Image (cartoon, grey):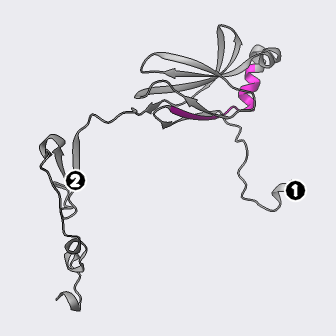
Amino acid sequence: MEESQKGNNNLLPELYNDDIMILYAVDPKRLFTCWEISEIRKNHFINDFGRELWEKSVPVLIVSNITRNESFEIRVNNFSDSWYINVPHSDCIYRVELGRRVSEHFVINLITSNSVYVPGDGSSSDTKILFADYRDISGTGFYEELNSDDIGPSFSFSFDIEDTLSPSSYGIKNEDTK
C-alpha cells in the first residue's frame, strides 16, 4: 500500500477510469460540466487515428443549444476535467460534447453529456397561487388554487398567531388551557 494511503482507507479515487460527462444548469446564464475519459477510450482513439493525431489535436467542448439549433465551441486544455460555461440564452435545452479538434473543420467526438433545461431569467408567466390547507390532509382539496387576478388590490390576509400556535389548536391540553 502506498505511504499516503496507510493512514486513511476511506479515500475516494481520483479517477474511476470510466467514460462519463455530466452537465448541470447552474443558473439561467451558466452551465457546469464535469467529465472523465477512460484510458480505454483514449487508447481507442490512438489505435484508430494514431498517437500523432492525439498529440496534435486539441480538446474542445461543443455546447449545443438544442432549442435554438445553435452551437459554439470552447477550447479546453488536456488537464481539465470540468468547466463553467456561460450561455447566451436562457429558457433553452443544452447539451455538451467533448471532442478533439483535428482540423479547422473537423472534430472527433469522445463523449456527450446529458441534456439540461436552463430556466428562464425573467418572471414566470404562471400567475397561479397555491395555498396548503394543513387542516385538511385527507387528500381532497389539499391545495386551494387561486388566480392572482382573483385577489385584486383589496385582498388582505390576517391571522391570529396566538391561536395558530396555541397547544389547544393541536389537540394538546394542559392545566392552563382547560
Tag 1 secondary structure: helix
Looking at the image, the residue that sits furthest to the bottom is 175
Say above or below: 125 vs 140. above
Vertical order, 108 against 30 (above or below): above
Write down the quadrant of residue 156 in the picture: bottom left
Q: Residue furthest right?
A: 3
Q: Nearer the viewer, residue 67 or 8?
A: 67
Q: Of discs 2 and 1, which sits in the foreground?
A: 2
Q: Which residues are magenta?
A: 30-45
Q: x and y percent of residue 56 in the render? A: 79, 15
- The crowding category of the residue bearing disc 2, from other C-alpha atoms within 10 Å (few below 14, some 14 to 19, many at least 20), is few
Badge 1: residue crowd in 10 Å (few <14, some 14–19, many ≥20):
few
Query: Image quarter for residue 161?
Result: bottom left
The residue at the point 66 percent across, 10 percent down is 106
Q: Which residue is mark 2?
A: 131
Q: Position of residue 87 (x, y in %)?
A: 51, 26
* Amino acid of disc 1: Glu
Whole-angstrom CA distance, mark 2 to mark 1, is: 59 Å
Element at label 2: strand
Quadrant of the rendering where the N terminus is positioned: bottom right
Residue 23, image x and y in percent? 54, 34
In the shown orientation, is residue 116 left or right of residue 125?
right
Residue 24 numbered tag:
none
Which mark, residue 3?
Answer: 1
Q: Earlier in the sequence, mark 2 or mark 1?
A: 1
Q: Is residue 156 left or right of residue 117?
A: left
Q: Quadrant of the C terminus?
A: bottom left
- Which residue is nearer to you in this view: 37 or 122? 122
Whether residue 40 is in magenta: the answer is yes
